[in-house]
Image (cartoon, rainbow, N blue to C red):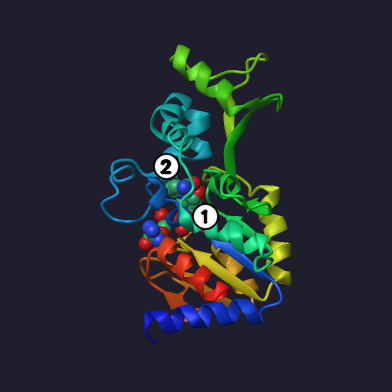
């Protein structure tokens, strides 16, 4: 099947489905200038292992290292802008083709692009909290502390502050369980920009009857999918939009 036949098939899947969900990963945001974890040559994560520096173990045992080598990269996400791939997902929801977006991303770009029903299964960078008393803090507060103090940011109670991002070794946030329940009700899952190598988020693909994968490189689940398109997310989603409008 050539590319334009695949786009027609994807549009057909969406029209035939009762309830469509998207599952997005870091690959949808690379066109917004945010490096993913696994594409080769993106540089950022080649020297440090994100599974190590973004782990609860490092946060607890060596908070200086967590904030210096891992957390600093979260701050770079704050000014990123959504790209056409995020925007088309917002449009699909507005036109009632899409029931919601499950995202592994923490960058908040789906909301910035107009998506209303977003489940952030790895948390987000809008807020943080105290590990001792659980008090909530806006991310701007944590950023401000880091600008003026070389020590890891602390709460008024003296506890260590941490971002509301699911780190390696953390329990899954409530949004993951919400996403699981939603996936059980869906009949089409549109995977966009994910290597599907992080569990348990990748297990959501097993809950949905039909799966379409849009990803630059092959994923671990390509062999099980009903449609696979190895292309850039923005190109595919813009072509899908034209097909659905036509
Ligand atoms: P990943 O494992 O880095 O995979 C990303 C995939 O996207 C790769 O297979 C690429 O081939 C593909 N890709 C890259 N660019 C494009 C593009 N333009 N169009 C289509 N596909 C593309 O990332 P996953 O999300 O699968 O892994 C899950 C981790 C990465 C989650 O915990 C995320 O929180 C984490 N992460 C998030 C961000 C973010 O919030 N933007 C950035 C980096 C990492």
In the image, what residue occupies the spot 38% across and 32% down?
69
Q: Is mark 1 within 8 Å of ligand 1?
A: no
Front one among 122 and 23: 23
In the displayed structure, 112 sits above or below 73; it is below
Residue 62: which numbered mark, if any? none
- Specify the quadrant that holds the N terminus: bottom left
Q: Which residue is mark 2?
A: 52
Q: Residue at x 42, y 69 (%)?
A: 219
Quadrant, the C terminus = bottom right
Q: Are marks 2 and 1 in contact (CB under 8 Å)?
A: no
Mark 2 Cα-neighbour bin, 10 Å: few <14, some 14–19, many ≥20: some
Does 159 appear above or below 115? above
What whole-number distance in Å separates the C-alpha atoms at marks 2 and 1? 29 Å
Taking 86 as reference, is 44 left or right? left
Q: Residue at x 61, y 30 (%)?
A: 128
- Which residue is at 51% across, 83% downward? 9
CB of residue at label 2: within 8 Å of ligand 1?
Answer: no
Residue 111: x, y in percent?
Answer: 60, 47
Q: Which residue is under mark 1?
A: 86
Q: Can I make out residue 175 in this image?
A: yes
Q: Earlier in the sequence, mark 2 or mark 1?
A: 2
* Ligand 1 positioned in quadrant: bottom left
Q: With respect to residue 61, does 95 lie above or below?
A: below
Residue 12 percent across, percent down from the top left: 57, 82
Residue extending farthest front: 246
Q: Position of residue 106 (x, y in %)?
A: 54, 44
SS for tag 1? helix
Residue 130 seen in the figure: no
Q: Is residue 179 above or below residue 145?
A: below
Helix, strand or loop status at disc 2: helix
């Amino acid at each position: 099947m050539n590319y334009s036949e695949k786009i027609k098939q994807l549009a057909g899947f969406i029209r035939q489905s009762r309830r469509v969900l998207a599952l997005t990963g870091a690959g949808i945001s690379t066109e917004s200038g945010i490096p993913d974890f696994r594409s080769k040559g993106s540089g950022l994560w080649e020297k440090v292992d994100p599974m190590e520096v973004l782990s609860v173990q490092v946060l607890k045992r060596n908070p200086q290292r967590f904030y210096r080598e891992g957390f600093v990269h979260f701050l770079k996400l704050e000014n990123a802008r959504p790209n056409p791939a995020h925007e088309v997902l917002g449009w699909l929801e507005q036109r009632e083709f899409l029931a919601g977006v499950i995202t592994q991303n923490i960058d908040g770009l789906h909301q910035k692009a107009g998506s209303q029903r977003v489940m952030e299964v790895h948390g987000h960078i809008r807020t943080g909290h105290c590990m001792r008393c659980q008090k909530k803090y806006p991310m701007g507060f944590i950023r401000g502390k880091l600008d003026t103090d070389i020590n890891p940011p602390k709460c008024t109670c003296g506890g260590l502050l941490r971002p509301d991002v699911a780190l390696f070794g953390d329990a899954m946030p409530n949004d993951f369980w919400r996403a699981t329940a939603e996936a059980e009700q869906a009949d089409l899952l549109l995977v966009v920009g994910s290597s599907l190598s992080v569990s348990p988020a990748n297990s959501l693909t097993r809950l949905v009857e039909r799966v379409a994968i849009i990803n630059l490189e092959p994923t671990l689940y390509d062999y099980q999918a009903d449609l696979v398109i190895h292309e850039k997310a923005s190109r595919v989603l813009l072509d899908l939009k034209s097909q659905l409008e036509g």
